[in-house]
Image (tube, grey):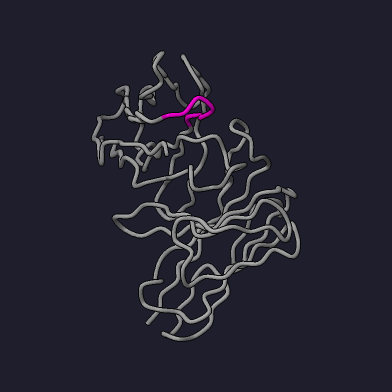
């Protein structure tokens, strides 16, 4: 069961790059790594997903080392609007049951002016 | 409007009463989910459904009942509400159960208070 470990909270100044690392030592061969973002009083929103190496989209980059036991979400030049909770999930979906997908408590990112 | 909606957005009820939270999605997604979110616990899966008439338990199913007679609706019922069920409830849907392309789309949430 590939549960994840993330820092509880992080602070960053506006304009800086933020890297949030997630540990998932028990990741399985078929597992993907997915990150969600949640603003206060809203449901989570999908940010990015990857399997290995690097994935980049208009919002973020996801770096996954060769052993896949961790991953790093990178947010370039954060703004105040990036203040949110970020969740790292590891799993192969729910074809074999939803118990392999856990949101956990996430990382609370606070962007400071 | 297209998307995923939840109703009511806010609900106050009393201990022992039955409460039903509604979830409706317009994408015809196969998968639907119910989560609860509490301080210190993050998001926890209550029940999920792979298709109409197919449901299964998540991490914290006790005290909850679900049904899915139509693809677009996935109601969650608290048969006898308890104070410990005071929480924010999120419904979500997903097109696929595959490892990739399993992005979940979340509703706006229902804030339930049980007195």
Question: Does B110 sit above or below residue A38?
Answer: below
Please check the rendered image and state whether residue B19 is part of the magenta-colored stretch, yes or no: no
- Left or right of A113? Residue B56 is right
Please name the residue shown 36% across and 60% down the image: B38
Residue B21 horizontal/vertical position (percent): 57, 70
- Percent across and percent down for residue A27 are 42, 29
Q: Is residue A41 left or right of residue B98?
A: left
Q: Main secondary structure of the magenta part?
A: loop
Residue in the foreground of this view, choosing between B84 and A55: B84
A100 or B36, which lies in front?
A: A100
Q: Quadrant of residue B67?
A: bottom right
Residue at position x 50%, y 56% from top?
A: B58
Which quarter of the rendered picture does the C terminus of chain A lie within?
Answer: top left
Estimate the x, y position of residue B85 in percent, counting from the top left.
41, 71
* Residue B87 picture location, percent across and down: 40, 66
Depicted B15 relative to depicted A20: above or below: below
Pick the residue in front: A16 or B114: B114
Residues drawn in magenta: A27-33
Q: Residue at x 64, y 55 (%)?
A: B49
Q: Residue at x 48, y 64 (%)?
A: B61
Q: Is residue B25 left or right of residue B92?
A: right
């Amino acid at each position: 069961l590939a549960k994840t470990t993330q820092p509880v909270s992080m602070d960053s100044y506006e304009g800086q790059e933020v890297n949030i690392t997630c540990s998932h030592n028990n990741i399985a061969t078929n597992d993907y790594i997915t990150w969600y973002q949640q603003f206060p009083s809203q449901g989570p929103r999908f940010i990015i997903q990857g399997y290995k190496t690097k994935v980049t989209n208009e919002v973020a980059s996801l770096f996954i080392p060769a052993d896949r036991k961790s991953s790093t979400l990178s947010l370039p030049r954060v703004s105040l609007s990036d203040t949110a909770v970020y969740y790292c999930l590891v799993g192969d979906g729910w074809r074999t049951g939803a118990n392999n997908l856990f949101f956990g408590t996430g990382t609370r990112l606070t962007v400071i002016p | 409007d297209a998307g995923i909606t939840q109703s009511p957005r806010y609900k106050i009820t009393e201990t022992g009463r039955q409460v039903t939270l509604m979830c409706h999605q317009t994408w015809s997604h196969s998968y639907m989910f119910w989560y609860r979110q509490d301080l210190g616990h993050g998001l926890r899966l209550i029940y999920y459904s792979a298709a109409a008439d197919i449901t299964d338990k998540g991490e914290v199913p006790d005290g909850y009942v679900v049904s899915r007679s139509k693809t677009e609706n996935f109601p969650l019922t608290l048969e006898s509400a308890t104070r410990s069920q005071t929480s924010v409830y999120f419904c979500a849907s997903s097109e696929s159960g595959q490892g990739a392309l399993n992005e979940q789309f979340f509703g706006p949430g229902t804030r339930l208070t049980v007195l």
